[in-house]
Amino acid sequence: MTRIPTARLFRTATGSDLVLTRTFRALADDVWASLTEPERTARWFGPWEGDGAPGRTVKVRMVFEEQGPWMEVRVDACDPPRRLAVSTQDEAGVWRLEVLLAEVDGNTELRLVHHLDTEEGIGEVGPGWEFYLDMLIASREGAARPVFDDYYPSMKGYFEGLREGE
């Protein structure tokens, strides 16, 4: 299967924003539930536990990653059903993410924004987000899960091209 990357890269005053978009034939409240309810996030990203309130940290298990590691994720902002901002830190640095939902006539556009301090590694990060958003779609539609090998390394060049301004 050939997947086509959809991400765009925008330069900002503080770095760059990698933005990926998906549209759902669903109300924002329903899409929001897929992003925030542990039993629903478990279907496409991983379950989480803890108090998911702004300023709090939850533990997320990345079940679709090798060895299913747990990671701590800080909830920076939560404005249901429109905006969720989180951050996490690992050996690659600090990851700052926002999910923005906009509903029009029963359709909801989801924008995942990865606020990048540096564009290094975008060739690895970008395909991962494309994969996870397609996992979200599959979980909502009851479809077969995508296979990561359809995203990486085939999309790496596209994302490196974004970095180079192509």
Image (cartoon, rainbow, N blue to C red):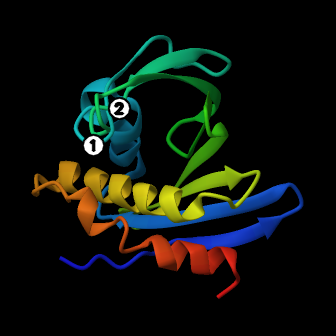
Q: Quadrant of residue 143?
A: bottom left
Please, what secondary structure does the residue beneath circle 1 have? loop
Q: Nearer the viewer, residue 62 or 28?
A: 62
Please, what secondary structure does the residue beneath circle 2 have? loop
Q: Nearer the viewer, residue 104 or 147?
A: 147
Would residue 104 be seen by someone viewing this image from the given angle? no
Query: Which residue position is annotated with label 1?
Result: 44
Which quadrant holds the C terminus?
Answer: bottom right
Residue 38's spot in the image, x, y percent? 32, 25
2 or 1: mark nearer the eye = 2
Q: Residue furthest bottom?
A: 166
Q: Is residue 101 above or below residue 30?
A: below
Name the residue: 27% across, 57% down: 148
Residue 121 falls left or right of residue 30: right
Residue 130 falls left or right of residue 157: left
The amino acid beneath tag 2 is Met
Q: Quadrant of residue 35?
A: top left
Q: Is residue 115 above or below residue 38?
A: below
The reply to whether dot 2 and dot 1 touch (C-beta < 8 Å) is no
Say which label, 2 or 1, has the lower sequence index. 1
Q: Nearer the viewer, residue 137 or 132?
A: 132
Residue 158 falls left or right of residue 133: right
Would residue 126 be seen by someone viewing this image from the given angle? yes
Residue 135's spot in the image, x, y percent? 27, 53
Name the residue: 69% across, 80% down: 164
What number is the disc on residue 62?
2
The amino acid beneath tag 1 is Trp
Residue 40's spot in the image, x, y percent? 26, 34
